[in-house]
Image (tube, rainbow, N blue to C red):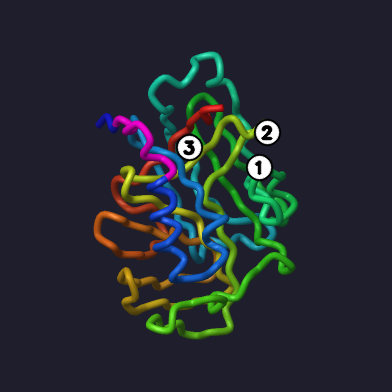
């Protein structure tokens, strides 16, 4: 299936997604930077939430087939390490995952196959799930800490790895330090049952719903893109 990026869609759509996700917590605006989805193909996916292997970390993807955005330069497909994310202290910069997440951490593409293994976020960077939450949403329990990863970057920030189903449906990685539910209706409908560990937070502009899953939902794929700069 080929999804062509409409000219100029990028900025306005990301802003809409940021407003929707802001209903959950205030810091999602600078954490939500999903870029356009284009050609994607099938892959395999391992469980996230509850898949903690102690000090071995959590397996997010193992041997997942990745795709590349239309027009992605052939010579750049050899880039394998995506161990960088946006700096929470300065969203215009990228930093190594190790700043925020304990080892072991692996985000690597080898021969077109993706492996992601993430340790636990460092306690100093966990944020309260009720921080800025809308009054119409019910969070149970409330003493839960979270951490988001919206996309992974290569070392120079020109290449990024993200997960989505379409330009209106994206999935970001969300860590919680204990089981929690987030339910209710604000400008969108929230129905999340998050398990301790890494989860997928699924934001759909198409349906106006925010849901969650411990495994990647049907139709969601991993894609590599190149920034237009």
- Residue in the foreground of this view, choosing between 45 and 223: 223
Span highlighted in magenta in the image: 4-11
Identify the image quadrant of residue 176.
bottom right
Report x, y in % for residue 82. Answer: 61, 37
Q: Of the numbered discs in the image, which one, if any, rests on residue 155?
A: 2
**Category of crowding for the residue at label 1, using alpha-carbon neighbours closer than 10 angstroms: few (below 14), some (14–19), many (at least 20):** many
- Residue in the foreground of this view, choosing between 124 and 91: 91
Q: Of the numbered discs in the image, which one, if any, rests on residue 84?
A: 1
Asked if the residues shown at circle 2 and circle 1 are in contact, with their CB atoms under 8 angstroms apart, the answer is yes
Predominant SS of the magenta segment: loop
Separation of residues labelled 2 and 1 (CA atoms): 6 Å
Identify the image quadrant of residue 148.
bottom right
Comes first in the chain, label 3 or label 1: 3
The residue tagged with tag 2: helix, strand or loop? loop
- Residue in the foreground of this view, choosing between 208 and 104: 208
Circle 3 residue: 63
Separation of residues labelled 3 and 1 (CA atoms): 20 Å
The residue tagged with tag 3: helix, strand or loop? strand
> Looking at the image, which residue is at 43% across and 84% down?
135
Report x, y in % for residue 214. Answer: 42, 61
Comes first in the chain, label 2 or label 3: 3
Report x, y in % for residue 88. Answer: 67, 55
């Amino acid at each position: 299936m080929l999804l062509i990026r409409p000219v100029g869609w990028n900025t306005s759509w990301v802003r809409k997604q940021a407003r929707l996700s802001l209903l959950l917590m205030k810091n999602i605006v600078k954490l939500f930077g999903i870029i356009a989805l284009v050609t994607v193909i099938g892959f395999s996916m391992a469980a996230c939430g509850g898949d903690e292997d102690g000090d071995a970390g959590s397996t997010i993807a193992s041997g997942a087939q990745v795709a590349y955005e239309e027009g992605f330069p052939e010579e750049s497909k050899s880039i394998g390490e995506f161990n960088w994310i946006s700096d929470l202290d300065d969203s215009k910069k990228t930093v190594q995952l190790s700043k925020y997440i304990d080892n072991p951490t692996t985000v690597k593409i080898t021969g077109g196959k993706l492996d992601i293994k993430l340790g636990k976020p460092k306690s100093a960077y966990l944020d309260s799930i009720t921080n800025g939450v809308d009054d119409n949403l019910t969070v149970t329990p409330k003493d839960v800490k979270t951490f988001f990863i919206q996309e992974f970057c290569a070392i120079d920030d020109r290449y990024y790895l993200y997960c989505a189903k379409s330009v209106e449906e994206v999935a970001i990685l969300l860590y919680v330090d204990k089981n929690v539910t987030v339910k209710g209706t604000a400008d969108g409908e929230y129905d999340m049952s998050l398990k301790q560990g890494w989860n997928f937070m699924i934001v759909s502009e198409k349906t106006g719903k925010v849901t969650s899953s411990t495994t990647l939902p049907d139709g969601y794929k991993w894609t590599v893109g190149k920034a237009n700069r």
